[in-house]
Amino acid sequence: MEKWKKVWADWKAKTKKKALAMRREASGTGGGPSSRQTLTASEQRVLGIMGLSAVFGLVGIEERGFDEPPLQGSPLPSPSRDTVHTEFPSQTAADEIMLYSIEGTFYLY
């Protein structure tokens, strides 16, 4: 029984992937040759059993994220910027390195 569950799960996943690829191609901007993929009768039956919402999602459903609390002031300190002049053993006599400091930690850019 477990073997058939795996076969069914694999078949659903493969069919869903193929249907999504076909949808993506159909809504693409073009510019290249079409792959002309089609669903077999068996794949169409699998989609019928799964339902189109399993592949394409529900229409008209608003996606919501997490509510973020309003920021009061700056939650992170603003980095300070210092310019450091240094000499390198290369052809350039002096290069500028931007040194940023955030709470005592320095970053070179």
Image (cartoon, helix red, strand yellow):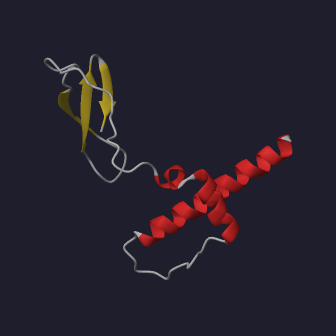
Residue placed furthest toward the bottom: 33
Q: Is residue 87 above or below residue 27?
A: above
Q: Image quarter for residue 43?
A: bottom right
- Residue 57 lies, with reference to residue 106, above or below; the image says below
25, 90: nearer the viewer? 25
The x, y position of residue 15, in whole percent, is 64, 60
Count of numbered labels shown in the rendering: 0
Picture quadrant where residue 81 is located: top left
Which of 54/36 is in front? 54
Looking at the image, which residue is at 49% across and 51% down?
53
Q: Is residue 65 left or right of residue 40?
A: left
Find residue 102 and report its horizontal and vertical position in percent.
26, 22
* Residue occupying the point 66% across, 71% down: 40
Residue occupying the point 65% across, 62% down? 45
Residue placed most toward the observer, 46 or 105 = 46
Quarter of the figure with residue 38: bottom right
**Vertical order, 16 against 78 (above or below):** below
Image location (x, y in percent) of residue 79: 21, 26
The x and y percentages for residue 44 are 62, 65
**Direction left: furthest residue:** 73
Which residue: 58% across, 75% down? 37
Quadrant of the snapshot with the N terminus: top right
* Quadrant where the C terminus is found in the figure: top left
